[in-house]
Amino acid sequence: MTERLDGPQAAGGDDSAAGASSGPHDTPAEPTPAARLGPSPKLAVMFLLPAVLLLAAWMIYPLVYSIWRSLFDATGGTFVGLRNYISIFTDSGTLTTIRNNIIWVVVAPVVVTVLGLIFAVLTERIRWSTAFKLVLFMPMAVSLLAAGVIFRLVYEQDPDKGVANAIITTVHDAFSSSAGYPGARPRDNDQAPAVAKGGAVVTRQPAQAGTPVLIPLVGLNQDAVKGAAPAKAAAGGDGGDGLSGTVWLDVVRGGGGTLNQVDPQEKGLAGVTVEAVSGGVVKATTETAADGTFRFAGLPAGSYDVRLPQSNFAAPFNGITWLGPSLITPAIIGAYIWVWAGFAMVLIAAGLSAIPRDALEAARIDGATEWQVFRRITVPLLAPVLLVVFVTMIINVLKVFDLVFIIAPGSVQPQANVIALEMWRVSFGGGGNQGMGSALSIFLLLLVVPFMIFNIRRFRRDER
């Protein structure tokens, strides 16, 4: 039977046990190692190895090889050092590509960012904001190749095919008539009542007030006046105080008719400007009616030269030559803006939604106008987002290729050329000089890398 120890004995027993456990010959227990967080390094290497191999195969090796290849000539057999890089800044064609890239960098990112900001602010104030954002963002769903095809049709010179010129010519014709008869001329013989002088058509003999004037023209395809009213011989003036006449196409389909006389089968030329000239001064101006007749009412008695000015025979206004050498780069930039403005709007709208509304409402309560709120509060608070959008657009425009290649016709492609397209043309598009193409690719990389580093640092700073 075990005895129960109380008091000092129990305490002494405890002290002895404690003294025994803490003796000088006892070794202290080792601390437990801290638990490792995450997978083991070997497992991490196994997962990273495929990505590292792909990165080396698709980026590191091509980069190193391009640098090495840029130091050789077109055949790759002769070492030329930095000659290809020197050619970039001495060849006139390559300098044109650099100039175009500078235009792209200066214009496109600024316009895209500004339009994105405007659209983002406006969408907060309209009812159908989601639908509006969807419509603006929809071009992002279209590839740049398809966008290039679309805008190649938009910029067609013929107003019947090109949407841009169809709109421009419609607006132009609403304020100024573009009716013209290019190629029309009087007959070149002594019996013709009118002659050509300096592009205009003038009556051979001065006309007297009260006597009808006949101005027959030829040189027009009858399809050009298809649907025109039949020509009509003008009546004489009333009491000698008027001058009238007829301008018509003196041609009968299939032949026949009387020369220099108005026949029933012949068509009048409508909308022709007619001038009455005396002493080298235009005394009156009028236009022909649908049947080709014209009349100067109230013209004083006397003799006048009746003249059809040169503007009647100029080609009608057919819009702007968008795909010409002078406008090709702005036209392509317009297509780029159409594609990317919605992207910028979405990013800026996301930043706008994160702005504290208290600051905006406080400014309005203090009496600030909407413009002051926008300029002094909204824009400064959105500055980080605007900067990210702007730098991203710069990186994109430095690499632009598809739109330029598709929209620019072959005849003006040298005037619209950019570095990325020139790199492809020199290497694979018939140039066959991969040494120069490699040099252009490295040059383009050196232009893009600083902006990429800036963006990465910006993202890391925002994460902190």
Image (cartoon, rainbow, N blue to C red):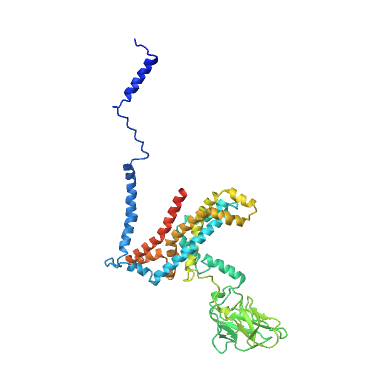
Where is residue 363 drawn, in percent x and y? 62, 52
Of residues 308 and 21, which is closer to you in this image? Answer: 21
Q: Can residue 409 be seen in this view?
A: no
From the top left corner, tell me how far across and down residue 384 is, in percent. 50, 54
Please determine whether, in this image, residue 100 is positioned above or below residue 307: above
Location of residue 372 with respect to 26 vertically, above or below: below
Say above or below: 285 vs 78: below
Q: Residue 49: x and y, percent? A: 32, 47
Asked if residue 56 lies left or right of residue 95, the reply is left
Q: Quadrant of the N terminus?
A: top left
Of residue 10 and residue 330, the one placed in the foreground of this image is 10
Count how many numbered circles sit on residues in the image. 0
**Would residue 328 be visible to someone looking at this image?**
yes
| 331 to the left or right of 40 | right
Which residue shows up at 65% across the image and 80% down it?
285
**Residue 249 placement, left or right of 241:** left
Question: Residue 404: x, y in percent?
Answer: 44, 64
Residue 433 is left or right of residue 238, and the answer is left
